[in-house]
């Protein structure tokens, strides 16, 4: 169905925009709101562009990039903030991986839950 990485959402500090892929409009509003808050706060704090995407196997990736001439982008702060988000939002991120595997890859939820 899909090839390559599938973008879930992203936030862009340069354009002051948040993007949620229309493929994920079925997510509960509270989850969409939490994603928006998480991504926008990240880019407001660190700068650059933050993207959450899925690999073909359903693993959720966090990708950050910054314009080459952006002297305000905090590269060290970026790494630390990503680690902080992965710890604080661990349940959310794991639930999003499970959601993708069940609804997009048609994997058996009971088998996936048994693995954890």
Image: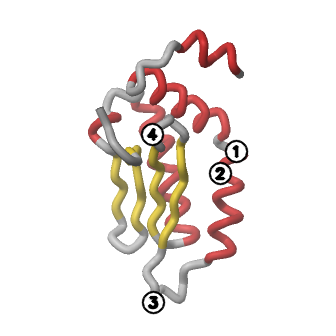
Image coordinates of residue 33 in percent, x first then y, are 44, 40
In this rendered view, identify the residue nearer to me: 3 or 52: 3
Q: Earlier in the sequence, mark 4 or mark 2?
A: 4
Image coordinates of residue 105 in percent, x first then y, are 42, 25
Q: Secondary structure at mark 3?
A: loop
Q: Earlier in the sequence, mark 2 or mark 3?
A: 3
Q: Would you call the spot at circle 3 few (<14 residues within 10 Å), some (14-19), or many (20 or more)?
A: few
- The residue at the point 46 percent across, 21 percent down is 102
Q: Picture quarter containing residue 109? A: top right
Image coordinates of residue 10 in percent, x first then y, are 41, 55
- The residue at the point 53 percent across, 33 percent down is 97
Q: Separation of disc 4 and disc 2 at Cα? A: 23 Å
Q: Which residue lies under the disc numbered 4?
A: 56
Considering the image in quadrants, where does the C terminus appear? top right
- The residue at the point 54 percent across, 84 percent down is 72
Frontmost of labels 3 and 1 is 3
Q: Secondary structure at mark 2?
A: helix
Q: Which residue lies under the disc numbered 2?
A: 85
Pointer 4 with pointer 2, Cβ within 8 A: no
Q: Separation of disc 3 and disc 1 at Cα? A: 31 Å
Image coordinates of residue 83 in percent, x first then y, are 70, 56
Pointer 3 with pointer 4, Cβ within 8 A: no
Q: Secondary structure at mark 4?
A: loop
Q: Earlier in the sequence, mark 4 or mark 1?
A: 4
Tag on residue 36? Answer: none
Q: Separation of disc 2 and disc 1 at Cα? A: 5 Å
Q: Picture quarter containing residue 15? A: bottom left
Give above or below for 101 relative to 14: above
Q: Which residue lies under the disc numbered 1?
A: 88
Q: Secondary structure at mark 1?
A: helix
Q: Which residue lies under the disc numbered 3?
A: 69
Frontmost of labels 4 and 1 is 4
């Amino acid at each position: 169905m899909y090839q390559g990485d599938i973008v879930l959402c992203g936030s862009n500090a340069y354009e002051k925009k948040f993007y949620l892929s229309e493929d994920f409009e079925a997510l509960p509003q509270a989850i969409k709101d939490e994603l928006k808050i998480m991504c926008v706060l990240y880019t407001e704090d660190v700068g650059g562009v933050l993207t959450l995407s899925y690999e073909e196997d359903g693993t959720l990736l966090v990708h950050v990039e910054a314009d080459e001439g952006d002297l305000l982008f905090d590269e060290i702060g970026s790494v630390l903030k990503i680690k902080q988000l992965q710890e604080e939002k661990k349940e959310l991120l794991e639930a999003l991986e499970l959601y993708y595997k069940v609804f997009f890859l048609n994997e058996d939820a009971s088998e996936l839950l048994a693995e954890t």
